[in-house]
């Protein structure tokens, strides 16, 4: 039996990941914050694939939510944990300089590195050497600073280095830890970014090398592979899923120069 825990697994990129893992035969423990209707709809949809879905409501920043999430493995599954996917997150509207509060900074630290630490330490109690898979959902903005992610990007940067440190520490046990960094992906979180960067909604998809924005399914395809046994020799890696946007500075310069001829 394959069991995966997915934080933020009932909406946006997390939902795309849940769908992919379900299609690969994973039974799922899905954390969500408040939207009970979305969680119930996800459960009904995915259980049609003849797998078991357990949903756990709660703020992933709180230790009691993390405890309940992993207690569900004991309560509902007679199995070890195969995979942990940390995908919970949300927009924290803030700008630099001055357009933020230190409460927002602390919130981002709780949401990303601290919740990841809590989840990892719990998950390792349930993982089998040689089989455990961990995937952290970060963001392209961690390595390409801009106006949008000014609180979340530093927090996700901390989460990334923690993931790499875990990758080294767990390599002798053949438990892998990898980082997936989506670019701009069309989800319901998009509106949160528009509050501080409204111009994003006016940028055409043709501004990207592949001519489109990302979809949750694009991210999920990679996560599905990284949660499989076939990925067992890949660990500590940071992989963009952005259609080449992280490479696009010179592509855009070339395109603009061509238009000026």
Image: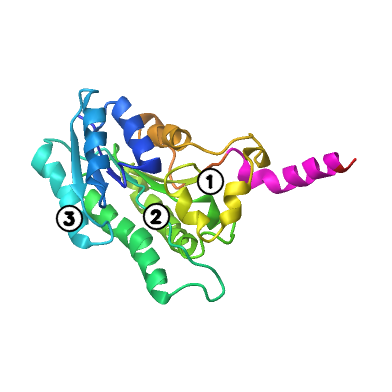
Residue 83 drawn in magenta: no
Element at badge 2?
A: loop
| Tag shown at residue 184 | 1
Residue 81 position (above or below residue 156): above
Work out whether mark 2 precedes mark 1 in sequence or the reverse, and give the earlier one.
2
The percent coordinates of residue 221 (x first, y second) are 44, 32
**Label 3 sits on residue:** 67
In this rendered view, identify the residue nearer to me: 237 or 143. 143
- Mark 2 neighbour density, 10 Å: few (under 14) some (14–19) many (20 or more): some
Identify the residue at image location x=33%, y=56%. 116
Magenta stretch: give its range.
Answer: 243-259
| Residue 128, visible in the rendered structure | no
Location of residue 130 (image quadrant) = top left
Residue 259 position (above or below residue 33): above
- Looking at the image, the residue that sits furthest to the left is 75
The percent coordinates of residue 48 (x first, y second) are 23, 23
Work out whether mark 3 precedes mark 2 in sequence or the reverse, and give the earlier one.
3
The percent coordinates of residue 93 (x first, y second) are 46, 63
Identify the residue at image location x=13%, y=49%. 71
Q: Is residue 49 left or right of residue 247?
A: left
Foreground mark, 3 or 2, reads: 2
- Mark 1 neighbour density, 10 Å: few (under 14) some (14–19) many (20 or more): some
- Mark 3 neighbour density, 10 Å: few (under 14) some (14–19) many (20 or more): some
Work out whether mark 3 precedes mark 1 in sequence or the reverse, and give the earlier one.
3
Do residues under tags 2 and 1 come within 8 Å of each other at their CB atoms? no
In this rendered view, identify the residue nearer to me: 160 or 43. 43
**Label 2 sits on residue:** 90
Q: What's the distance in space between the residues labelled 3 and 1, CA to CA?
A: 31 Å
Element at badge 1?
A: loop
Q: Is residue 123 left or right of residue 234?
A: left
Do residues under tags 3 and 1 come within 8 Å of each other at their CB atoms? no
């Amino acid at each position: 039996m394959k069991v995966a825990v997915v934080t933020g697994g009932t909406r946006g990129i997390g939902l795309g990941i849940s769908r992919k893992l379900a299609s690969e035969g994973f039974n799922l423990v899905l954390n969500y914050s408040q939207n009970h209707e979305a969680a119930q709809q996800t459960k009904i949809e995915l259980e049609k694939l003849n797998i078991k879905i357990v949903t756990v409501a709660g703020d992933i920043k709180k230790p009691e939510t993390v405890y309940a999430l992993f207690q569900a493995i004991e309560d509902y599954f007679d199995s070890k944990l195969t995979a942990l996917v940390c995908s919970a997150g949300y927009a924290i509207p803030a700008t630099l300089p001055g357009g933020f509060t230190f409460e927002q900074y602390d919130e981002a630290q709780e949401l990303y590195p601290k919740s990841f630490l809590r989840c990892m330490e719990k998950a390792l109690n349930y993982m089998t050497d040689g089989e455990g898979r961990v995937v952290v959902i970060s963001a392209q903005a961690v390595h390409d600073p801009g106006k949008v992610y000014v609180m979340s990007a530093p927090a996700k940067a901390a989460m990334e280095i923690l993931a790499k440190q875990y990758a080294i520490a767990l390599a002798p046990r053949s438990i892998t830890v990898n980082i997936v960094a989506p670019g701009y992906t069309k989800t319901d979180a998009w509106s949160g970014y528009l509050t501080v960067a409204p111009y994003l909604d006016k940028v055409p998809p043709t501004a990207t090398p592949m001519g489109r924005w990302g979809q949750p399914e694009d991210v999920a395809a990679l996560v599905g592979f990284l949660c499989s046994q076939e990925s067992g020799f890949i660990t500590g890696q940071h992989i963009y899923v952005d259609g080449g946007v992280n490479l696009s500075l010179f592509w855009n310069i070339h395109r603009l120069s061509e238009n000026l001829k």
